[in-house]
Image (cartoon, rainbow, N blue to C red):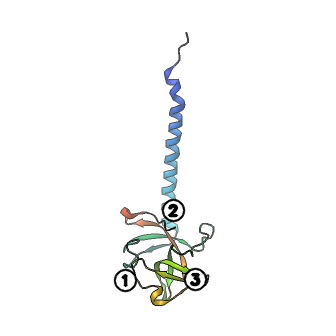
Amino acid sequence: MTHRNRSSRHVPRRAARRRRVLGRTAALGAALAGGALAVLLLPRVEVEGRSMLPTLEPGDRLVLLPRTARALLPSVVVPGRLVVLADPRQESRTLVKRLTAADGEAVLVEGDNPGQSTDSRHFGPVPDRLVRGRPVYRYAPAERAGWIWDD
């Protein structure tokens, strides 16, 4: 009568479980490192004012994927997306708005809180070249941190 070692049956299961745990840990570590790297290397903006409530709140800090990152971002100018753009009245200022229309040369933008927003309803169409990119990650405040999905 042969005697089987009971623990030998469980070795493949343990190894598979260990590989799954290590794989998940590595993926989580890569995501966190990527998020930290994005916060450090990509442009950032801070939301001021109440024009984008409830989507964005004053004090939200956002990582911007610049429009120049064409390989990562085939098209920024898609109606419904949040965009970061230069204020057409004073290009040194930055606005965060929702894109409502685009024709290839100009865009229309509006705030999610119309009563508190100065947008295309006030200053008209914005030249397409003033769109700088789109916010993709909120890194502060910590309790609101996470990816921004607007597709």
Residue 54 drawn at (x, y percent): 38, 72
Mark closest to the chain's N terminus, 1 or 3? 1
In the rendered image, the quadrant that contains the N terminus is top right
Residue 113 x, y percent position in the rendering:
39, 78
* Residue located at (57% from left, 73% from top): 76
Q: Residue at x 53, y 45 (%)?
A: 23
Spot occupied by residue 53 in the image (x, y as percentages of width and height): 38, 74
Q: Quadrant of residue 127?
A: bottom right
* Residue highlighted by disc 1: 115
Does residue 33 appear left or right of residue 145 in this picture?
right
Measure the C-alpha gap from mark 3 to mark 2: 29 Å
Q: Residue at x 49, y 81 (%)?
A: 109
Q: Which amino acid type corresponds to the residue marked 2 in the rendered image?
A: Leu
Q: Is residue 1 above or below residue 87?
A: above
- Choose between 9 and 77: the one closer to the eye: 77
Residues tagged 2 and 1 counted as in contact (Cβ below 8 A)? no
Quickly name the residue at label 3: 128
Describe the element under mark 2 as helix, strand or loop: helix
Frontmost residue, 42 versus 107: 107
Q: Residues within 10 Å of mark 1 (few under 14, many from 20)?
A: few
Nearest-to-viewer mark from 1 and 3: 1
Classify 133 as above or below 10: below
User: Is there CB contact under 8 Å for labels 3 and 2?
Assistant: no
The spot of residue 105 in percent (x, y) is 61, 84
Measure how far apart labels 2 and 1 are at the Cα level: 36 Å
Number of the front mark, 2 or 1: 1
Secondary structure type for disc 1: helix
Label 3 secondary element: helix
| Kind of residue sitting beneath label 3 | Asp
The answer to which of marks 3 and 2 sits earlier in the sequence is 2
Looking at the image, residue 146 sits to the left or right of residue 102; the answer is: left
Q: Which residue is mark 2?
A: 37
